[in-house]
Image (tube, rainbow, N blue to C red):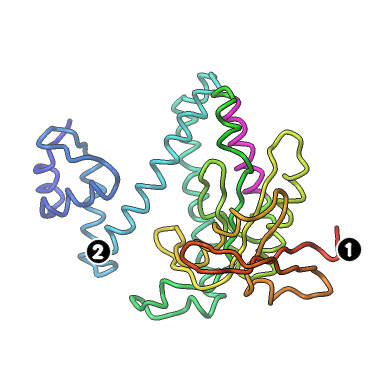
Amino acid sequence: MTFTSRQVAAAAGMPLADVRRLWRALGFADARGAASFTAADIEALSLARDLVGDDLMDFETIVQLTRALGRTMSRLADWQVSTLRETGDPRATSDRSAVAFEQLLVYAWRRHLEAATVRRRSRPDLDAPAGSESARTATETVGFADLVGFTSLSNGLATDELASLVETFEARCSDLVAAGGGRVVKTLGDSVLFLAPHPVVGTEVALAVVETLGTDPELPDVRLGVATGKVVLRLGDAFGPPVNLAARLTAVARRNHVIVDARTAAALAPDSYVTRTLTPRPMRGFGDVEPITVRRHWNTAP
């Protein structure tokens, strides 16, 4: 049995405007009076109503979480469908597989929720009053990994080859970031943006990416930009000057090299890393900036 948005709003005991707002936040277009909803939609809205009614969350917080959930699930669903389609195995789309994947989804969410909670509790700069500006900012080291010459390379590759290249780069880069103690914020095809809690951690991750992927004959060369400073953490994304500066530094880095800003370089021990300040160059939004190359000291190389 299906319902219109008005019927769903009435059944869930919510204003129609709120129902439509949550539906859009989830990432879907307005139903415009069509009977497009099910009992599951009523149940979900009832849960949201109860969270507000029991003073567990305010409605604006629910909208924000719904938007974050919608963006994440939309990408995951597209990824899942394309992956299963590529396998061509009918067992991958069976009901049993769907149930198993749902269980894994909840498991992964709980593990990441625990990790995010621990991360926040261990960082004094994240422990700020709710609603304050400092509650949304943190000092992070931002890394931006980029494939060299990707645009021209992609023009000469078949679709399957291009997809395989991007997937390999994203997967291997993400593994190196996680292994080094950082976390991937987002991937942009030929680029990966990651965060690290300290300049040394961020630099080590960047060097590991260069040392591992930069020597892989199956992948193009890479370049890394790293910057440290206060970033805004919002809806699972990161914004702010360090994010922009890391991207600018990547653009001037030589292939298979790591370029850092002055704040990151100042945190690196000279007996472990060799840094060299380059000629200042204009960077949009930052004026003249002195990029700094970094490599391991010869006696600390793995």
3 up-or-down from 94: above or below: below
Image coordinates for residue 230, horizontal then vertical, percent: 50, 73
Q: CA distance from mark 1 to mark 2?
A: 53 Å
Disc 1, disc 2: CB below 8 Å? no
Q: Which mark is residue 298?
A: 1
Q: Amino acid at mark 1?
A: Trp
Q: Secondary structure at mark 1?
A: helix
The one nearer the camera, 292 or 72, is: 292
Q: Amino acid at mark 2?
A: Glu
Q: Is residue 283 left or right of residue 67?
A: right
Q: Is residue 229 left or right of residue 19?
A: right
236 up-or-down from 11: above or below: below
The one nearer the camera, 90 or 175, is: 175
Toward which corner of the image does residue 131 lie, by quadrant? bottom left
Q: Quadrant of the C terminus?
A: bottom right
Q: Is residue 133 left or right of residue 18?
A: right
Mark 2 closeness class: few <14, some 14–19, many ≥20 residues within 10 Å? few
Q: Which SS type dominates the magenta stretch?
A: helix
Residue found at x 36% / y 76%:
130
Residue found at x 34% / y 57%:
65
- Segment tinted magenta in the rendering: 161-175
The reply to whether the magenta stretch includes residue 8 is no
Mark 1 closeness class: few <14, some 14–19, many ≥20 residues within 10 Å? few
Q: Secondary structure at mark 2?
A: helix
> Which residue is the site of mark 2?
60
239 up-or-down from 38: above or below: below
Toward which corner of the image does residue 259 lie, by quadrant? bottom right
